[in-house]
Amino acid sequence: KPKPEAVVVETKAAPIAASVSAVQAVGASPRAKALAEKEGLLISAVQPSGPKGRIIERDVLAAKGQPLSPLARQKALDEGLAAPQQGSGIGGRVLASDLVASTSPVAAAPAEEVTEIPVKGVRKVTARRMMESIHSTCQLSLHAWADARALKRLRAGFKASSAELGLGGITINDLVLFAVSRTLQQFPAFNAHFLGDKILRYSHVHLGVATDTAKGLLVPVLRNSDVLSLKQLSLQTKALVGKCKDGSIAPDDLTGSTFTVSNVGSFGIEAFTPVLNVPEVAILGVGTIALKPVEDEDGDVAFIEHIGLSLTMDHQAVDGADAARFLRSLMDNIAKIDLLLAL
């Protein structure tokens, strides 16, 4: 009797990537799990794109085009590592060296440190006055640009002048302050204090010059600026600002302004909304000088340097149209500052 032939039953080895533990360890849809088992992919190495980080069928399909090397597959299974979307092997094949931890370790949160800073001194005074301003006034701001070519031309001339003349230190801000003091003479309603039941208009202009110091905002007063020459105005402004910065300013030099100017142009700010220095009825914010397109009579457009101006006024004391007229006049005076100096 012949011996029966040995029958060899060939079974397909279950792919490592389809291990039950690996599939269950990752949030995946049933279709994604089934496809991963069929294709022999490691479900934990598939990049998820579904809701809440869930692996869906299209993620498995995408992973088919970027298979793992046998060594990478085994390492991913043993160590629970995730495969990147693109490997460093040929054709984007993911190698063992490409694997990364599936969950990056969460760095311990740094210890929180809170520093308590008492509100006192200049900061406390500023806080009180700013809140008083906002709560007691009806503030409206208008913004405009003034041709700055004359300012730049004069500044360059002063800088290049003989030291004996003492004009080299005159700045763009000094020229603006001069223009403001003369414009306020034409618009006395803006050189005033609003006191609720009455308005006080002043015959002379006492300009407040907002000054940034190490201790905070200070506003020294340039008294009778409307009768000062440009050189006098420049020298007195520098003296007051210097005292503010070195802490030697007298209290009397910080009170009695009738109109304030705040210049932040050196920071590149074009326009802003300065807060009223109550009880004054208006404050001017000065911005940076920037190129603006201007059309001439022939329809040609040229880029001209302009300086930003922001006027905030108390609508309780003055009307918007009056503020617009004041700002328009100031723009003209700045654009023709050389003529204004000749008056």
Image (cartoon, grey):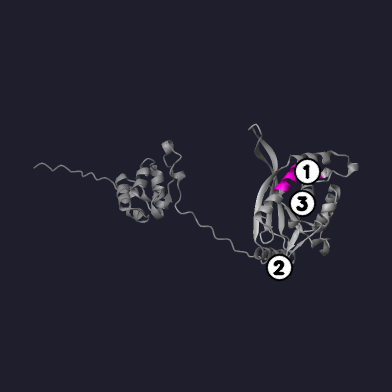
- How far separated are the C-alphas under marks 3 and 2? 24 Å
- Give the mark nearer the N terminus: 1 vs 3: 3
**Residue 112 x/y as whole percent:** 60, 64
Determine if the magenta segment contains residue 332: yes
Identify the magenta region.
Answer: 328-340
Q: Can you see residue 103?
A: yes
Q: Which of these two is toward me, 75 or 217? A: 217
- How far separated are the C-alphas under marks 1 and 2? 37 Å
Secondary structure of the magenta portion, mostly? helix
Viewer-side label of 1, 3: 3
Q: Which secondary structure, mark 1?
A: helix
Residue assigned mark 1: 337
**Hey, what amino acid is under mark 3?**
Gln
Q: Residues within 10 Å of mark 3 (few under 14, many from 20)?
A: few
- Give the mark nearer the N terminus: 1 vs 2: 2
Residue at the location (43% across, 36% down)?
90
